[in-house]
Image: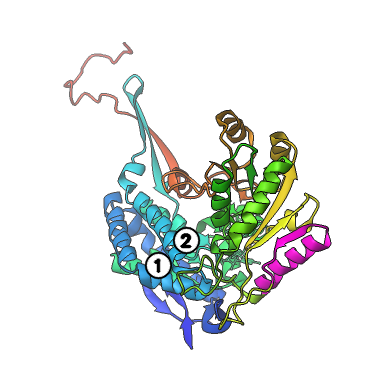
Amino acid sequence: MTTVGHFINGQLTTDGERTQDVYNPSTGAVSKQVVLASKATVEEAIAAAQAAFPAWRNTPAIKRARVMFKFKDLLEQNADKICQMIGEEHGKISHDAAGELQRGIENVEYACGAPELLKGEHSKNVAADVDSWSEFQPLGVVAGITPFNFPAMVPLWMYPMAIVCGNCFILKPSERDPSSTLYIASLLKEAGLPDGVMNVVNGDKEAVDTLLHDEHIKAVSFVGSTPIAEYIYATASANGKRCQALGGAKNHAIVMPDADMDNAVNQLLGAAFGSSGERCMALSVAVAVGDAAGDALVSKMTAAMKALKVGPFNDSNNDFGPVITQQHQQKVVGYIDSAEQQGATIVVDGRKPEIAGHEKGFFVGGTLIDGVTAEMESYKAEIFGPVLQVIRVDSMQAAMDLIDAHEYGNGTCIFTRDGEAARYFSDNIQVGMVGINIPLPVPVAYHSFGGWKRSLFGDLHAYGPDAVRFYTKRKTITQRWPSAGVREGVLFSMPTMS
Ligand code: NAD
């Protein structure tokens, strides 16, 4: 059986005694073993990064950016192979994996602009003959810890920017689907990156805790569930590290009475069920304003869901694949059960999908639940499965109050034809990323990504302009070159202030 190891100092290794099974969620079978790094292995990666840092820090930004140009090319050349790896371990259908990879590549493209992004700020003559400027220097060795749901894209949110800013990087990807992440990182060597600048250690809590406590790690970027994000942020901060920790989500779409309902249903279908709902920006709650909108939404959605196709990743006719593990499948089904027990109506029931030939796969079919209330467990929790819940309210203000009261504030959206309502919504809602008739308002690579409330711990958002600030420290230099007489010639008279 294939063993997935680490990428340390430019070499693929399989050091470590502990291993964990990696599944093919479409079949339910164990396909690989991933090696879980020990403290010593993580320290080896940190030492390699430390050794690479002085030369990399002094490499001109344009040369660092050139590595990213080649890296982008290699990602495109190897896209099919990468998408296959993602599908085998995550379960994502190839068209969805291709979308994930493309969004990741866009972060590499942004990183290619390093010379422009790192230009700094300059003010001439802040006082007579005094100039002042700020430059943005790398931090040193920085770390990233990433979730299973975007094994290519989320790591690419982090290390291209960290590296072009002059840092060395240690990535600890999800142990549940590690192959594509490891393969992609190893392409950086082919792109010309010096050994030690980028390192990948697979592992679990032991590896993460080593990174959080090691004094050489200057910053930690985390993306994952909220309880772990809180732990990472608290521990990294207590150890004097800069930290941004992006957590979980519960994303609501308001469906206004004037919305184009057919369009809203189409958009909701993709945003709720795409990638089996395992996206931190998935729309998992539709808030219908008024019963007429609620009835129309539920009836049109029920009809549309008849065409939904769930099945294995390697059939591109499928709309979405399995969830990540059997344990997660049971958790999602448990939330549907609890909604039913607490009085909601399961309008479309995906608890027992029949996928011929894939009976042991971790599948959950698209599920629609009506009559949900804010008190239900299924509403409070992030289900992270192909489940859309409908809540009915009387007014847009009630819909906004509901969204604002939820602990998460990652993404949200409004479907309406009323520009003023949309403007009021985007201006006032307590959520970090807002869509207006756009269901998944994931910012493009040249903006930054981040939620509010318990969806993000830290000050700066991920990628884009905020990444330049996160991965550098500002140094401000003020200079004056008083005349020493070289230009004016030698002065023999007594110097006076004039
Ligand atoms: P997770 O929190 O279980 O794991 C994330 C990372 O943390 C993994 O690398 C994992 O190995 C590590 N980890 C897990 N338990 C740990 C522990 N006890 N101590 C230290 N490290 C630990 O998340 P997941 O299930 O892989 O991913 C799904 C979650 O990620 C969802 O909550 C989703 O909303 C969230 N997510 C958020 C965003 C965002 O941008 N806000 C993006 C993608 C995913």
Question: In the rendered structure, which disc, 2 or 1, sits on the residue that comes first in sequence?
Answer: 2
Amino acid type at circle 1 is: Ala
Does residue 456 appear to the left or right of 494 in the view shown? right
Q: CA distance from mark 2 to mark 1?
A: 9 Å
Q: At which x and y percent is residue 59? A: 29, 54
Q: Is residue 367 magenta?
A: no
Image: 350 above or below 399: below
Sort mark 2 into few (<14), some (14-19) or many (20+) by Cα contacts within 10 Å.
Answer: many
State whether the magenta stretch is mostly helix, strand or loop: helix
Secondary structure at badge 2 equals helix
Contact (CB < 8 A) between labels 2 and 1? yes
* Badge count: 2
Does residue 492 appear to the left or right of 482 in the view shown? left
Q: Is residue 216 visible?
A: no
Q: Which residue is mark 2?
A: 155
Amino acid type at circle 2 is: Pro
Q: Residue furthest bottom?
A: 1
Q: Is residue 221 visible?
A: yes
Magenta residues?
327-351
Q: Residue furthest top?
A: 498
Q: Residue at x 48, y 47 (%)?
A: 470
- Tell me the colour scheme of the image: rainbow
Q: Residue at x 42, y 54 (%)?
A: 162
Q: Which residue is mark 1?
A: 185
Q: Is residue 342 magenta?
A: yes
Does residue 398 appear to the left or right of 474 in the view shown? right
Q: At which x and y percent is residue 428? A: 63, 33
Q: At which x and y percent is residue 403? A: 69, 43
